[in-house]
Amino acid sequence: MLNLSEVLIQNPQLETFDELLQIVKERSKTEIFFSIDVKPSYYDTPDNWEDRLEAMFT
């Protein structure tokens, strides 16, 4: 299972929500489940951030 908190901890170099989306897309190739357990704190995190992360994972 891929936890969003793990992605954020493992990738401290990320500076934008779009960069996070790309990492989630890459990790979706090797993971089956995705847990959104925290809210990303990027300046450009949109209001529909959960939907966008889920869409990128699937």
Image (cartoon, helix red, strand yellow):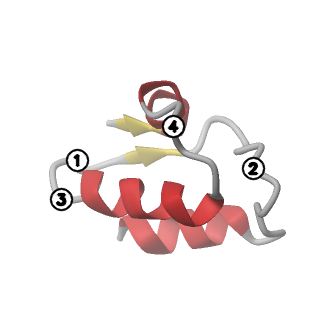
Q: Nearer the viewer, mark 4 or mark 1?
A: 4
- Residue 55: image x %, image y %? 48, 74
Query: Which of the pair 27/15 is nearer the observer?
Result: 15
Instruction: Kindly identify the residue that appears in the image at 45 percent across and 34 percent down.
Output: 11
Side of 26 relative to 55 (left or right): left
Three-letter amino acid code at the position of disc 1: Glu
**Labels 3 and 4 touching (C-beta < 8 A):** no
Task: Find the distance from the CA under tag 3 to the CA under tag 2.
Answer: 24 Å
Precedes in sequence: disc 4 or disc 2: 4
For mark 1, what is the residue?
31
The residue positioned 63% from the left and 48% from the top of the image is 15
Name the amino acid type tagged 2: Tyr
Disc number for residue 13: 4
Q: Position of residue 26 (x, y in %)?
A: 27, 58
Mark 3, Cα crowd under 10 Å, few <14 / some 14-19 / many 20+, is few
Label disc, if present, on residue 29 of the rendered structure: 3
* Real-space Cα separation, disc 3 to disc 1, in angstroms: 6 Å
Are the residues tagged 3 and 1 within 8 Å (C-beta)?
yes
Crowdedness near tag 4: few (<14), some (14–19) or many (≥20) residues, C-alpha within 10 Å: few
Mark 4 to mark 1: distance in Å? 22 Å
Q: How would you rate the neighbour count of disc 1 (Cα within 10 Å): few for under 14, some for 14-19, many for 20 or more? A: few
| Amino acid residing under circle 3 | Lys
Mark nearest the camera among 4 and 2 is 4
